[in-house]
């Protein structure tokens, strides 16, 4: 028996006793009305009522998994990730450390779905390589409430996807995208707030610069020498498609 911390309240018709998540690290919390069938749950993680984590899914340490979330076998969630209520995380989805996934976000993993039980589609679904497309969310990225992510794309580190967006293509690191389909409208600081035209954060004042199409913290060049500062000159982030097919 694992030493997972389970809420210490007597059984009742609405809060039945249940076996805690087998093999989870010490101090993980599994709500009595959650279903956790995975033995790969990190310490300090909290999984709330009516969430379902299937066998073979991996959830890192110090995460918060909200009510009515579903994490399928083969999904991977990093450390310190916040997943709000009603999120669907399917096989092939990998969410990096420190990400935020808003309520009702839907991931997908099959671009041309059919019922695998349909005789005409059975052959294609006999091997996962024929249909399964993987999706990656980079460290510190935020996915707004109700967003839908099509399969086979990558969301870059510290990117921000607006609420209700339909993401059909990859998103570059620090990019802010909104709409249906999602389109780039700016750049985000590591802290999460938009950058000004000067590429300085509107809150923490961190300064950024472009190196090619990649946005990076200012202060050093490729050779390691300090980069010149010119904050008075507006540097509007170009709304162009970045490397690797990213927005």
Image: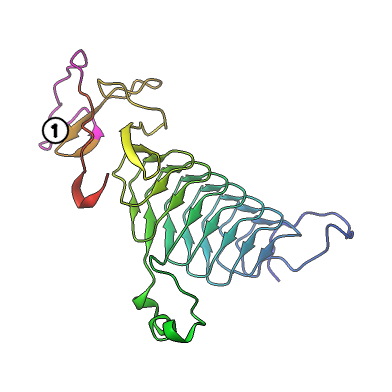
Q: Position of residue 139 (x, y in %)?
A: 39, 47
Q: Position of residue 64 (x, y in %)?
A: 59, 49
The residue lying at 56 percent from left, 58 percent from top is 42
The secondary structure type at the circle numbered 1 is: loop
* Camera-side residue of 63 and 69: 69
Q: Position of residue 203 (x, y in %)?
A: 41, 20
Residue wearing tag 1? 221
Q: Position of residue 61 (x, y in %)?
A: 54, 53
Q: Quadrant of residue 229?
A: top left
* Camera-side residue of 81 and 107: 107
The residue lying at 63 percent from left, 70 percent from top is 37
* Magenta range: 216-234
Magenta: predominant secondary structure element? loop
The residue lying at 52 percent from left, 50 percent from top is 105
Compared with 79, 201 (above or below) is above
Q: Quadrant of residue 47?
A: bottom right
Compared with 8, 72 (above or below) is below
Q: Is residue 246 left or right of residue 43?
A: left
Residue at the far left in the pictured view: 223
| 195 drawn magenta | no
Mark 1 surroundings within 10 Å by alpha-carbon count, few (fewer than 14), some (14 through 19), many (20 or more): few
């Amino acid at each position: 028996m694992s030493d997972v911390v389970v809420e210490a309240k007597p059984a009742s018709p609405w809060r039945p006793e249940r076996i805690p998540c087998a093999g989870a690290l010490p101090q993980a919390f599994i709500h009595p009305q959650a279903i956790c069938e995975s033995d790969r749950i990190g310490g300090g993680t909290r999984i709330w009522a009516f969430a379902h984590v299937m066998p073979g899914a991996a959830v890192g340490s110090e995460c918060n998994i909200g009510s009515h979330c579903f994490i399928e076998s083969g999904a991977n969630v990093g450390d310190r990730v916040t997943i709000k209520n009603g999120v669907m995380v399917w096989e092939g989805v990998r969410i990096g450390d420190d990400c935020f996934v808003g309520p009702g976000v839907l991931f997908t993993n099959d671009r041309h779905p059919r019922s695998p039980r349909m005789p005409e589609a059975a052959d294609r679904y006999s091997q996962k390589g024929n249909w399964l497309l993987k999706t990656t969310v980079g460290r510190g990225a935020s996915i707004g409430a109700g967003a839908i992510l099509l399969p086979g794309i990558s969301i870059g580190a510290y990117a921000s996807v607006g609420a209700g967006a339909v993401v059909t293509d990859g998103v570059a690191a620090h990019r802010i995208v909104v709409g249906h389909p999602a389109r780039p409208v700016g750049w985000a600081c590591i802290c999460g707030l938009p950058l000004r035209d000067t590429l300085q954060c509107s809150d923490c004042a961190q300064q950024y610069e472009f190196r090619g199409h990649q946005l990076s913290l200012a202060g050093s060049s490729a050779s390691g020498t300090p980069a010149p500062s010119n904050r008075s000159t507006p540097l509007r982030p170009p709304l162009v498609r970045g490397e690797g097919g990213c927005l």
